[in-house]
Image: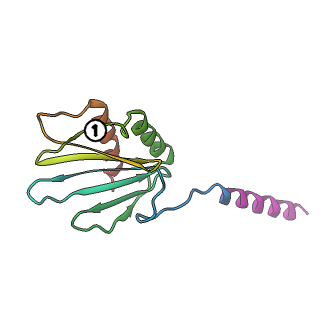
């Protein structure tokens, strides 16, 4: 009888944990809220783009190889915090487009709106808070 109760408990726990799984997305099927970031320019002009989703999924693509590849996921809470930071910084309302020969960017999409912030021109430095967000995002990709 104990075995039966144990088996039922195990099945119940397994069923509940399956209900808590977060959806998996593809690079072609993204959720409403996500962050894209990366860099480009220079001699080759190639742009590298990373896409971070709220569930921690991370994708990478380049303008030379646009088919995105999935990277190792980051912690869901970390991803959520970074998306919240982008929202708190007001990226959807910010208008900043000053690329240099070599540039960096953050593109935030939420509620059907998208805004891209681009910087690299030394004459137009980006806000330190945005630079800090970018550095945190890049750190996610450092061990990929």
Which secondary structure, mark 1?
A: loop
Quadrant where the N terminus sits is bottom right
Q: Residue furthest top?
A: 128
* 37 sits left or right of 82 in the view: left
Q: Which residues are magenta?
A: 1-17
Q: Residue sitting at 48 percent across and 49 percent down?
A: 54
Is 2 within the magenta?
A: yes
The image shows residue 95 at horizontal and vertical percentages of 28, 38
In the image, what residue occupies the spot 72% across and 61% down? 15
Q: How many marks?
A: 1
Is 48 positioned to the left or the right of 109 in the image? left
State which quadrant residue 120 falls in.
Answer: top left
The location of residue 89, given as percent across then percent down, is 38, 33
The residue most toward the left is 43
Q: Is residue 94 above or below residue 12?
A: above
In magenta stretch: residue 114: no
Query: Is the stretch drawn in magenta largely helix, strand or loop?
Result: helix
Q: Quadrant of residue 10?
A: bottom right
**Residue 2, quarter of picture:** bottom right
Q: Residue under label 1, please give it.
A: 95
Instruction: Compare residues 124 and 2 and report the one nearer the observer.
Output: 124
Rendered residue at 41%/58% (across/down):
72
Q: Position of residue 123 (x, y in %)?
A: 11, 34
State the scheme by which the image is colored: rainbow
Q: Residues within 10 Å of mark 1 (few under 14, many from 20)?
A: few
Considering the image in quadrants, where does the C terminus appear? bottom left
Residue 105 percent location from the top left of the image: 26, 46
Residue at 25 percent across and 57 percent down: it is: 48
């Amino acid at each position: 009888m104990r075995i039966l109760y144990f088996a039922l408990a195990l099945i119940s726990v397994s069923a509940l944990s399956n209900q808590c799984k977060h959806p998996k997305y593809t690079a072609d099927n993204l959720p409403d809220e996500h962050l894209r970031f990366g860099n480009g320019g220079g001699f080759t002009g190639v742009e590298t783009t990373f896409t971070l989703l709220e569930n921690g999924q991370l994708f990478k693509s380049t303008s030379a190889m646009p088919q995105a590849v999935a990277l190792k996921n980051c912690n869901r809470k970390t991803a959520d915090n970074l998306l919240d930071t982008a929202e708190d910084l007001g990226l959807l309302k910010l208008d900043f487009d000053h690329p240099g020969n070599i540039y960096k960017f953050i593109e935030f999409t939420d509620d059907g709106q998208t805004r891209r912030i681009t910087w690299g021109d030394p004459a137009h430095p980006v806000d330190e808070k945005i630079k800090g967000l970018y550095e945190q995002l890049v750190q996610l990709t450092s061990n990929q």
